Amino acid sequence: MKNALLVLIALSITSFGFGQGNTHKQEGGKFEGLAMTPPMGWNSWNTFATNIDEKLVKETADIMVSSGLAAAGYNYIVLDDGWMTHERDANGDLVPDPQKFPSGMKALIEYVHSKGLKFGLYNCAGTKTCAGYPGTRGYEYQDARFYARLGIDFLKYDWCNTEGITAKEAYKTMSNALKTAGRPIVFSLCEWGDNQPWEWGKPIGNLWRISGDIYPCFDCEFKHPENWSSWGFMKIIDMRKNIRKYSGPDHWNDFDMMEVGNEMNDTEDKSHFAMWCMVASPLFTGNDYRKMSKETLAILTNKELLAINQDKLGIQGFKYKVIDGVEVWVKPLSDGAWAVSFLNRTDSLKKINFDWKKNNFKDSDFGFETDFSKTTFKLKDLWKNKEAGSTKKIFISEIASHDVITLKLTP
């Protein structure tokens, strides 16, 4: 009996010892408050892929300031995949490519900062980046310290070569690593929406991609030989249902970098930009500023549309209805205003005949609604920058194929 008692005591001590392993709560999470409106800037990937260097970055920074893009709110320059060499150094640190960046990455970042801009880099949660450079898997805390020493302000974190790991835990680990390193860095989750990041990303990152890569077309699917697809901007708009409730200040649904100025016509560029503003997406340009037309610049710097995107309420717009191929998108704004976009998805000219009093908006996710029979709203056409009557009268207009009309309704 004595021996049996000793065995029981020993077992209970052992069980107690093993049970202690899960009592520590892991602290961490993103730096809060860094992206209270959708972040804006430029990313190298859409036009340049891995063909990047310090001359390109400096020229982009210079034009961002001289063209008025910076004054309009575009303040991040983000170098995407391809900025590093194919091997880490003897200490395990990432090595910025000395041929592409002969002055060194830190000096380049200081140049960008001297222009009043912010700087971002790219890496990947897997063993390799999407272009085959060293990924961060197993180096999360080391890489976070490296980024903090460089002085970056933004990290885009991709999802290639991630066999055997879970998205939520991988992104949580990197988020905690950035927090531990101590420098406030906007954390952009580029996981393509495969693991529903909108459901778990809010405490981890400031924005998360909802789709695979964008492609410069209105409504196409571009199939790559490697068995994956890029998507026209309206395909991305259509891709996810019922996720707008997860988006808001400091935790944005990211519809990908824009293709404005890349291969589409000005009408489609205008619609692309309007839709990214309506859905409160982060606004990252992806064109070559050195070849930018005045029309492209005018689209990207439309102050009225940017105000819709940057509205402090931070609510993502939604598709209210479709009338003969014309989609009606609405977005609640602060101070009781609304943005309304009519988007022609068809290949032909359409006529709009919109009776406000028969079309009261109701936002079931956030509780906003209109009653046009009780409240009259003034209309302003945000592309023409002129008043357009009020909701007392039926709104009548023509709209070209793939074009957009965006109105602001002010009570």
Image: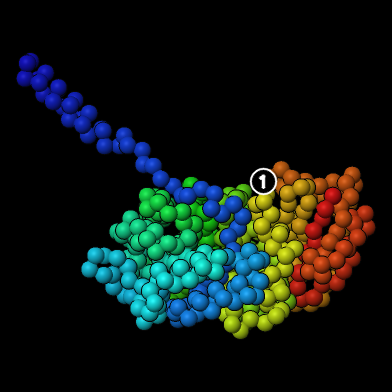
Residue at position x 74%, y 59% in the image: 329
Callout 1, which amino acid? Answer: Asp
Residue at position x 40%, y 69% in the image: 106
Residue matched to label 1: 365
Query: Of helix, strand and loop, which one carries label 1?
Result: loop
Label 1 crowd bin: few (<14), some (14–19), many (20+), radius 10 Å: few
- Say whether residue 19 is visible: yes
Q: How many marks?
A: 1
Residue at position x 53%, y 56% in the image: 207
In the image shown, does 83 or 222 lie closer to the viewer? 83
Give the quadrant of the N terminus.
top left
Residue at the limit of the structure toward the front, as seen here: 114
Residue at the limit of the structure toward the right, as seen here: 393
* Position in image of residue 163 (x %, y %): 34, 62
* Position in image of residue 282 (x %, y %): 59, 61
Residue 325 found in image quarter: bottom right
* Position in image of residue 172 (x %, y %): 41, 51
Left or right placement of residue 390 versus residue 401 in this view: right
Taking 14 as reference, is 362 above or below it? below
Residue at position x 61%, y 72% in the image: 65
